[in-house]
Image: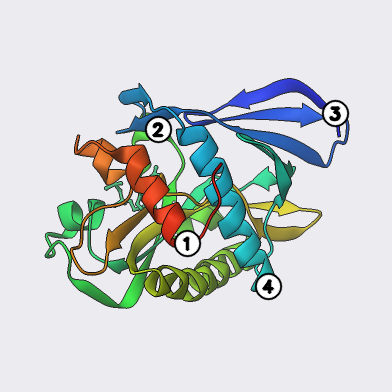
Amino acid sequence: MEKRAELYAGKAKSVFLTDDPDYLVLQFRNDTSAFDGEKVEQLDRKGMVNNKFNAFIMQTLQAAGIPTHFERLLGDDEALVKRMAMIPVECVVRNIAAGSIVRRLGVQDGMDLNPPTFEFFLKNDALHDPMVNDYHIRTFGWASDEDVAQMKALTFRVNEVLKKLFDDAGMLLVDYKLEFGRFHGQVILGDEFSPDGCRLWDKQTRNKLDKDRFRQGLGGVVEAYEEVASRLGIKLD
Ligand code: UDP
């Protein structure tokens, strides 16, 4: 597989074409951003840690029967993925209240959410990723009803697999964001799963082990990600 020109540079990852139109190279950079790109810093080792973390999670999900775009690791900060047509919405499931749901609904930070909630957000930094519902998605043609049903079903299946994975390693999966796309007509999981896009708390202390450390200026961001990786048995070096 030959890496070709850069197709797109996002806030934390860059995407490159390959000699095969069905595949892309995903490069995980050290850039770390928050607040719709208003706060940006370079964090040493983060690209490598997230690339390997993501590979482990995607392979775990794939093994559990959840289709993903992940093919294989190519190096420390690169992976080969299927080229999908992305659906421009983010799917968020919450097991515990934190972040925007606390701000929007005034609910208690840290309360258990039973059953877990599901939310769609439009991917649009300029509009600050507004919350949207199934009707917006259908009316504006972002995805079909079948795609919406599939995204919801897959996002909840991910919850079953990953809640247990993190729980067994002494962590609470508080919430997470997933993005999907279409590949030869099938809706599959794309983007990444890493501590940049989920909240993970230590089960005993409820210490934050995710990007909230960066958002809230708590320090020790990559160290926390490495701690999570180590608890899951992910080899980084
Ligand atoms: N999230 C993300 N990208 C976004 C917005 C949210 O990865 O553009 C993740 C975030 O890390 C958290 C979950 O989605 O795990 C829910 O985020 P929330 O709506 O609480 O927003 P936030 O408080 O992060 O602004």
Given residues 78 and 143, the one toward you in this image is 78
Q: Is residue 198 visible?
A: yes
Q: Is residue 165 left or right of residue 186?
A: left
Q: Position of residue 97 (x, y in %)?
A: 23, 64
Q: Which residue is mark 2?
A: 125
Q: Which residue is mark 1?
A: 232
Q: Is residue 110 left or right of residue 166?
A: left
Q: Is residue 149 above or below residue 119?
A: below
Q: Position of residue 225 (x, y in %)?
A: 39, 47
Q: Earlier in the sequence, mark 3 or mark 4?
A: 3
Quadrant for the N terminus, please.
top right
Q: Position of residue 110 (x, y in %)?
A: 17, 65
Crowding at dot 1, Cα within 10 Å, few <14 / some 14-19 / many 20+, comes out as some
Q: Give the Cα separation between the discs numbered 3 and 4.
A: 29 Å
Q: Give the Cα separation between the discs numbered 3 and 2.
A: 32 Å
Local secondary structure at mark 4: loop
Q: Earlier in the sequence, mark 2 or mark 4?
A: 4
Q: Nearer the viewer, mark 3 or mark 2?
A: 3
Q: Nearer the viewer, mark 3 or mark 1?
A: 1
Q: Which residue is mark 3?
A: 2
Q: Residue at x 42, y 27 (%)?
A: 44
Q: Mark 2 vs ligand 1: CB under 8 Å? A: no
Q: Earlier in the sequence, mark 2 or mark 1?
A: 2
Q: Give the Cα separation between the discs numbered 2 and 1.
A: 32 Å
Q: Amino acid at mark 1?
A: Leu
Q: Position of residue 70 (x, y in %)?
A: 69, 51
Q: Which residue is mark 4?
A: 65
Residue 174 found in image quarter: bottom left
